[in-house]
Each structure stands twice: as C-alpha cells, then as structure tokens.
Image (tube, rainbow, N blue to C red):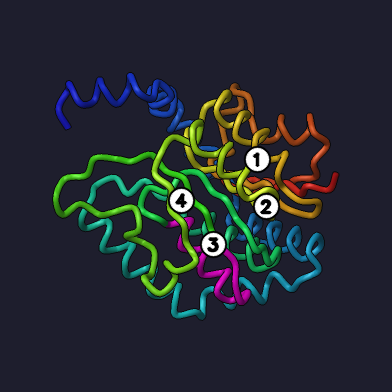
Amino acid sequence: MSIGRKLVKVMRDPWILLRKATSPLIERRKAAMDLEQERARSIRFLSEHFGVDAAALHDEYWSSAFASWYLRWYQELGRLVRDKETSSHFDLVTLYMLVRALRPEVVVETGVNYGASSAHILAAMRENGGGTLYSIDLPKPRPPGAPSQDFLVPPELSSSWRLILGDSRDELPGLLRTLGQIDHFHHDSLHTVQHMSWEYATALEHIRYGGVLSSHDVVVPLSLQNVFETFCRKHGLPYGVFRNVGIALCQW
C-alpha cells in the first residue's frame, strides 16, 4: 500500500493508530489467557444461562462439515491476502455455540470483512433449523481477484443472509426500525469508545427480553476503558467475556 493510501486510511479511521500502538499489549493479554480455561468458562456460561449442553455444541462444531470447509477456505484466504483480519477461531467457535444455544430468529451484525463471523452465525442457524442474519459492512474497494465480503461464507448458507453495504451510522437505525425486535446483535465494526457505545445503545432498544448483545474485540490494554464491560454495568446486563468476545444477556 502506498504512503498516500495509508494516510487516507488513517484519516478515515484514526483508531487505526491506537490499535497499532496498543496491539502488542493486547496480544500479550490474550496470550496470557489459558485457552482451555477460557473455553471451559464459555461452555459453563452458555450451559448455565441457556440450559443447553454447550460442551456437546462445541464437539458438534468440530465434527461438522462446515468446520472443515471453513478451515480450508481460511487457509486459501491466507494465500491470497497477507493480513486476513478475521476473528480468531476460538472467538468464532464461541459465537457458533452462542447462536446454537440462543436459537435466534433474527440476528443483526455490524462488520463483515471476509465473512468469518457471518459464516459461523449462519452455520449455527442452519443447525437450529432457521433464522435470518442481517449484516452491515462498509463498501470497500477491492482490486480484481481480491477476496469478496462473502469469501468465507459457504454458498449454501447465503439464502439466509442479507448483506447491507453502508456505514452502520446510516444503516443500523433504519434496519432496526424495520425489523422492530431482534434476538441477537453482534458488534464487530469500528472499535472506538464512541462508536461501540453508540452501536450497543442503538441495538439494545430493539433486543427482546432474553436476547443477547455480543461484541468482538472487547479486550483492551488495562490502561484503556473496556467499553463493553462499562456498558453492561451501566445498564445492569449480566455478561461474560471469553478471550476476545463479550456476551451480555438482555434480561430487562
């Protein structure tokens, strides 16, 4: 990428500079987490709050044809692009188990990139027997031959997917008004205090009782404000954070 294009990217998203500066700190925090303990915590949380056997859902995922398909295409993505910029597999499996446990009919997510989280939500919905995912993502100029926003989404799952290209500031309020009530909102777009807080608050008004607000990239350096946890405490939402995914229960 040329210097000029890099400057334009930073001007559009100043948070890039902070992410670059704090990335080593965040990675050290995540590396310090014991993955087996984090997985056990996520399984216990989902089992207790949704009355399911989340351990069985975890095993279901890893024995599925979808998991094998996703790993193959994720490796292919790595061959095509240097910076894959997708959620970790740990976080994606957590999201899959959450959707299987919640059994939502309507899910709204912001942030798609190559479709990693979208694919896992859709795969879980298929196992549930139905549901529709509405995803909002910024339109991004891509050179010929570059991976598209549905690169990691199996074609057979696309019939349950509605991809909306635009800024969530413009698209999210209208979509939520049209849908009225939703079961699950998942944030994975611009990770700034202001934007995350706005998306959480905007979505919360439309999440049904017993629904879920979830967010990716909730781990921050200890010196910075944890937006997700702060929001949950402010609104009295029971929540859990597992590696880099936050799950809040909308019980009000």
- Between the C-alphas of marks 2 and 1, the distance is 9 Å
Q: Residue furthest front?
A: 178
Under circle 2, the secondary element is strand
Nearest the camera: 105 or 29?
105
Identify the residue at horizontal 24%, vertical 47% (top origin).
82
Pointer 1 and pointer 3: residues touching (CB < 8 Å)?
Answer: no
Q: Quick check: marks 3 and 2 in contact, CB under 8 Å?
A: no
Residue at mark 2 = 182
Tell which tag, 1 or 3, sits nearer the viewer: 1
| Amino acid beneath label 1 | Ala
Tag 1 residue: 203
Residue contact at pointers 2 and 1, CB within 8 angstroms: yes
Q: Above or below — where is 73 with respect to 64?
A: above
Q: Which mark is residue 87?
A: 4
Q: Does 119 appear in magenta?
A: yes
Q: What's the residue type where badge 3 is placed? A: Ile
Sequence-wise first label, 1 or 4:
4
Q: Is residue 45 rendered to the left or right of residue 70?
A: right
- Binning the other alpha carbons within 10 Å of mark 2 as few (below 14), some (14 to 19) or many (20 upward) gives many
Q: CA distance from mark 3 to mark 2?
A: 14 Å
Apparent side of residue 36 relative to residue 3 in the rendered image (left or right): right
Out of 164 and 37, give the one closest to the viewer: 164
- Judged from the image, the secondary structure of the residue bearing numbered disc 1 is helix
Q: Secondary structure at mark 4?
A: loop
Say which residue label 3 marks: 121
The part of the chain drawn in magenta is: 116-132
Query: x%, y% of residue 181?
Result: 70, 50
Quarter of the N terminus within the rendering: top left
Q: Nearer the viewer, residue 27 or 229?
A: 229
